[in-house]
Amino acid sequence: MGNMLARLLRAAIPAQRVATTAAPRSPWWRTAVVYQVYLRSFADADGNGIGDLQGLRSRLPYLAWLGVDALWINPHYPSGGADGGYDVIDYRAVDPEYGDVADLEQLVADARRVGLRVILDVVPNHTSDQHPWFQEALADPSSAAASRYHFAPPSEEPPNNWRSLFGGPAWSRTPDGRWYLHLFTPEQPDLNWRDPAVAEDFERTLRFWLDRGVSGFRVDVAYGLFKDADLRDNPGTYSPTLFGHGPEQAMTWNQPEVHDVWRRWRAICDEYDEAMLVGEVSLADVGQVALYSRPDELHQSLAFRLLKSPWSAEDYAEAVVEALDAFGEVGAPVSWVLSNHDKERKVTRFGGGDVGTARARAAVLLMLALPGSAYVYAGDELGLPQAAVPDEAKRDPIFFRSGGLRAGRDGCRVPMPWNETRGVGFSTDPDARPWLPIPEDWGRYAVSRQARDGGSMLTLYRRALAQRRAHPSFAEGEASVSRQGDVLTVRSVGPSGTVRCVVNMGSQPVVVRCPGSVLLSSTTRLPRSGDGLALPPDTAVWLSED
Ligand code: BGC
């Protein structure tokens, strides 16, 4: 199907319809805009240079004003700190750096009062090496805890040819010479999901947080958990691409047994009011990704291709059509993603400077015009570029494990600028040393400055979110996607009539037919041309045809 689709798109004829989807009127998550909070970098209430739950709580009015529907908070658990909190020591607690369980409950309750739901990150593929289970397993190879991980007896060679996603082998030795599996860092031993105690414990964790009012979970590495039962060698060579997993790693990822975990988790969520699960399913084949969101599995699985596509109408059209088709087949909404804490900031990815900013503005209008749900990463609404973090300040294991060959992800995790004062308002103590250095010029991106500026990135996001709400045809309508050269059009028919998003991804202005009215545009330079509009390069416009 992939090739046929690609051919069709390459041959695209004016306004040819290449895909359509109809999203039924919906529970909240089907069309929600979810704001991803990198907790450590969002807002620091206790003045220690590390973002925390009370800091986030103090910024809830901002998020309500911005107009998103829900928050997803990156891991808040006690952690060994080897991988930005994705090495969890205790799944039913809050790291004291961030606060405590009462703070989280307060956050959830306050968020609800301003119309925001809270989603937590759950990390079931691996624990921290400091987790009590792993510690017990290290101390006693015959303990029950040892069977909750993948250990192999001492031998010269590791049990198979698997590699860590962060670089280096996926097996390390214990002090007594045994091997253990870690698909990420050695501080993140992989759990053995064939041991029922593992599943039971995670089910307890889900209920623990759902009982405290959270509205669901972002599931880390949801395509992992189970490994080939015999841990056979992978057939292909290791790909250095961070999250591109294809058939060459068939023994490591995407084992059929994992789908039953999601069925059980879905049943648990169904016991609670409108709780949802969104999976990180970083498989190369979107058809496989969509299978994780069959009606009795995860509510959503993130569609990552836009996050990786070059700035080209052909690539974008293909990514959008492919996702609409794949998720449409299983009746799930697409969950669109343009950026997150693992990828270079999109302004930089799109070329940086004015060009990168113009493209980022156009791209977000495209994303928010697509049917389904969308994920916005904190700081993107400010147009933050990738920050240059000096090597000596870096924290990301990817940088260290690649021997410095890969820059790592710190540059997209730098604290948020809230105002133009010293310390840019990140911490209540302006003299606090932030956990990652904040660039000198960060104040120019500050919320306070952009909120006053009708032409800022922040204003664009806010307007787009308001228009998306006012015109449910965007998120709920039946969309058709077409491409004419470098121009991509999404036309949606739904409860608020017919709306269109047109993006010019080429280098020349194009004339866009405009029978109705302009709802929003990523540029202020939108001159009339005959009975149409002249859309400059790297810009997008939202139109209503009624
Ligand atoms: C998270 C990463 C993390 C990895 C290991 C990912 O997919 O998004 O930030 O390093 O899982 O838990």
Image (cartoon, rainbow, N blue to C red):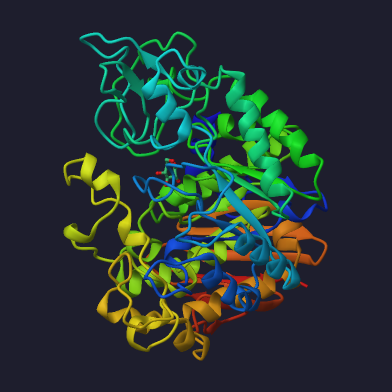
Residue 525 horizontal/vertical position (percent):
48, 84
Q: Residue at x 64, y 25 (%)?
A: 259
Image quadrant containing the C terminus: bottom right
85 in relation to 524, above or below: above
Q: Residue at x 67, y 41 (%)?
A: 206
Q: Is residue 165 left or right of residue 209?
A: left
Q: Residue at x 23, y 51 (%)?
A: 407
From the viewer's side, name the closer residue of 233 and 193.
Answer: 193
Q: Is residue 14 left or right of residue 427?
A: right
- Which quadrant does ligand 1 occupy? top left
264 in relation to 24, above or below: above
Place residue 177 in its image quadrant. Answer: top left
Q: Residue furthest front?
A: 139
Q: Residue at x 35, y 21 (%)?
A: 180
Residue 3 horizontal/vertical position (percent):
49, 30
Residue 241 horizontal/vertical position (percent):
32, 37
Q: Is residue 228 left or right of residue 117?
A: left
Image quadrant containing the N terminus: top right
Place residue 475 in its image quadrant. Answer: bottom right
Q: Is residue 401 visible?
A: yes
Q: Is residue 361 left or right of residue 20?
A: left
Q: Is residue 12 visible?
A: no
The mark total stands at 0
Residue 328 horizontal/vertical position (percent):
70, 39
From the viewer's side, name the closer residue of 25 and 542.
Answer: 25
